[in-house]
Image (cartoon, helix red, strand yellow):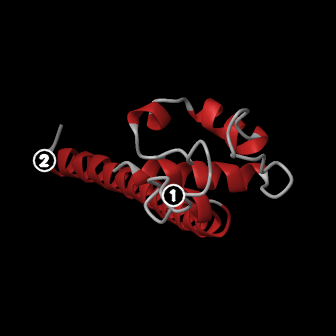
Amino acid sequence: MSARTLLAALLLVLSCWSVASVGFGQERDEKALREYYDLQEGRRLYEQYCRFCHGEQGKGKAYDQVTPPPADLTTSAVQGKSDAELANIIHEGEPGSPMGAWKWALSESDKQNVLLYIRSLAR
């Protein structure tokens, strides 16, 4: 194989590799951007629907007149629940507590965005 052929083959491989890595990086950037906007929407919805009881930081101390008190969303007891469990609590409410159902106010994507924000409160 001549040096010219070897160089051409090497350049072809490198150009394919760089195009593939740019596509992967762009896909990763788009996913991060999508998650950022989903998180911001979750924050907006949390402030509209959840902050009154659970507080700005999710500590459950915003409204002291309720018994039992609202859950501290940053605890391991809450954060340890699966996404499905938390989504169901948001959807149906929590029996025996003041947590009401939000199934009439929040769409499925709204609930997922709120859940994403609740997960971020523990970080």
Give the residue type at disc 1.
Answer: Glu
| Of residues 119 and 14, the one drawn nearer to the viewer in this rendering | 119
Q: Is residue 41 above or below residue 120?
A: below
Residue occupying image coordinates x 32% and y 55%: 18
Give the residue type at disc 2.
Answer: Ala
The answer to which quarter of the image holds residue 25 is bottom left
Q: Which residue is mark 1?
A: 35
As drawn, the residue found furthest toward the left would be 3
Residue occupying image coordinates x 62% and y 52%: 66
* Other residues around mark 2 within 10 Å, as few (<14) / some (14–19) / many (≥20): few
Q: Earlier in the sequence, mark 1 or mark 2?
A: 2
Residue occupying image coordinates x 63% and y 30%: 85
Label 2: state its secondary structure: helix
| C-alpha gap between disc 1 and disc 2 | 48 Å
The answer to which quarter of the image holds residue 51 is bottom right
Label 1: state its secondary structure: helix
In the rendered structure, are the residues bearing label 1 and label 2 in contact, judged by CB atoms less than 8 Å apart? no
- Which of the labelled discs sits on residue 87, or is there none? none
Q: Which residue is mark 2?
A: 3
- Quadrant in which the N terminus is drawn: top left
| Of residues 14 and 55, the one drawn nearer to the viewer in this rendering | 55
| Of residues 76 and 67, the one drawn nearer to the viewer in this rendering | 67
Residue occupying image coordinates x 62% and y 59%: 50
Q: Can you give x and y, in whole percent of width and height, for residue 6 in the image?
A: 19, 44
